[in-house]
Amino acid sequence: MLLSLTTSTCRTQETTNQVKVMIGKIFYFKIFLSCFLAIFNSDLLCVDAVSKTNVDRNKTLVWGIGLRANATLPVRYFFIQAVDRFGRNFTESVGEKAFQISLAVKGTNVWYGHNVFDRQDGSYIVRYRLHRSYKDIEIHVKHKGKHVSSSPFTLHGTSYHEDCYCPVLNFDKWLKAMECPSTYKQIDDDLQIWKNAINMEKLAPKIVKRFNHHGQHSICHYKIINNKLSRKCYGEHTGFSMFSDTPFLSLARKVILPDMDFFINLGDWPLSEKSSKQTYPIFSWCGSHETKDIVMPTYDITESTLGMMSKVTLDILSVQGNSPPWANKSNLAFWRGRDSREERLNLVMLSKKHPDLVDAMLTNMFFFPKDEKKYGKIVQPVSFFDFFKHKYQLNIDGTVAAYRFPYLLAGSSVVLKQDSHYYEHFYNELTPYVHYIPVKRNLSDLLDQLRWAKEHENEVKNIVENAQNYVLNRLLPKDIICYHAILINKYSKLLKSKPAPDSTFTKVDQPSDHDSYCQCHRKKPKKTHEEL
């Protein structure tokens, strides 16, 4: 009986082992079949885990204006798109330090600084600032110590650094090298009323008389003669001329500018009212539906472009490298700022009522009486990069348009923008629900728009992607410089006469270049007037 029981047990164990083997074979056959079907259908899901850790160096893409010597920018930049061995773009980060960048020139050390920004979507922005000019620079792009794509990339010819005065003689040739568009809609809209020519000899005295009022307006009259800048400013607060000087000095180092004269408004509010019988050709950093000023990029985005990797830390590129993925963000709408408009106070009070939806606080109060019971305590400013820890960003006007808008669009959060009659140079290229979520001027629908956003997350993610793509195509450093260049080039052709030298104007000198080597190999232009 015991022998029979033992035999029966052994047979049962043997049968169990056979079943386990069979199950194992079926399991591995299913894995093989699923892999085969995935490969057959080009889905390749079974190799995703391996693919995520394997960047194909040959298939990875590297491109951008920063890979050419003849495109001179304060900071040059290019892009990397990580690609796997099956030719698929990565859609998530492959590591903050996935790519190594270095610059080299035969026979000498290269003096430069650089950053690599992880955009958290499989793409990277590489930027570098040259502190001297070099010939035939090689840019090495590596992944795990080995070259990527066509690396090393050679910048044939001399790459001139930002402070080097070495202008190209032919303006159109320079525009082509910079890959500038033929025009911008806002420029055409602003200049169309001046198609009958601008008589600055008659208009200049009128502009000075109209806007030279102590404590009200501040303006500067500029002249460009023989590619040199001079100005005469009027008003009490003319210190902002340092911001209006820099873009034209920068352009003059890169290309020969046409002789011209123009006025720049140094204040926030645009000046030339539509309701007035007399219209004035005045450049302003902000436009409005009630004025006819000629709008140029704000001093904020211009300064962050020219001072990138030097004087500023917040810029249109650094924002993209400091924005966390959507899944890592809070569900709050976020805002910080000062009390420069009543709607901002209303926003803060709304936040106090709905802290589960909105986190809005004042960082300073200049314009309205302080009232801690109504508006809460004044809080310390928050790093702009920390804004993007939250999914929803609020863009509310200040004294005029809120100049933070370009940076908000560049981040990885969605922007809810207040309706406004103020605009920057690029607003007319944006579309509600494509690039941002619109909010009524009085903010009466803000909570409803927030709820809509929470209920339509896939649509909102598309809006974020559209906004970021717009920034990549229209608001990068090249675009800010191109806009200034095309604006003054088109404007100069509307002038009835060329400006004459004026000894009462102050020369605006180019920055000294004692610390940086700069030997220009280009032809020098002929003088059109005697020096001032």
Image (cartoon, helix red, strand yellow):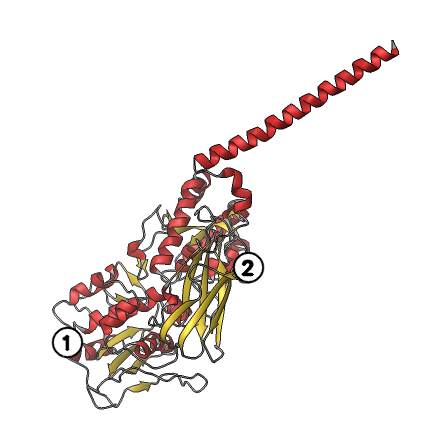
* Near-viewer residue (395 or 308): 308
Position of 409 relative to 518 (above/below): above
Inspect this view and state whether residue 355 appears. Answer: no
Tag 2–tag 1 contact (CB < 8 Å): no
Q: In x, y percent, where is residue 250?
A: 34, 76
Q: In x, y percent, where is residue 412?
A: 46, 52
* Near-viewer residue (341 or 173): 173
Q: Residue furthest top?
A: 1
Q: In x, y percent, where is residue 482?
A: 30, 67
Q: Report the amino acid beneath label 1.
A: Asn
Residue 19 shows which numbered tag? none
What whole-number distance in Å separates the C-alpha atoms at marks 2 and 1? Answer: 62 Å
Q: Residues within 10 Å of mark 2 (few under 14, many from 20)?
A: few
Q: Please tell me in which quadrant of the rendered image residue 241 appears.
A: bottom left
Q: Which residue is mark 2?
A: 144
In front: mark 2 or mark 1? 2
Q: Residue at x 24, y 71 (%)?
A: 173
Q: Report the amino acid beneath label 2.
A: Lys
Q: Please tell me in which quadrant of the rendered image residue 278 appears.
A: bottom left
Q: Residue at x 32, y 61 (%)?
A: 424
Among the two numbered marks 2 and 1 on one chain, the one whose residue lies closer to the N terminus: 2
Q: Which residue is mark 1?
A: 199
Image quadrant containing the N terminus: top right
Inspect this view and state whether residue 526 appears. Answer: yes
Image quadrant containing the C terminus: bottom left
Position of 156 relative to 126 (above/below): below
Q: Residue at x 21, y 91 (%)?
A: 530
Q: Please tell me in which quadrant of the rendered image residue 245 appears.
A: bottom left
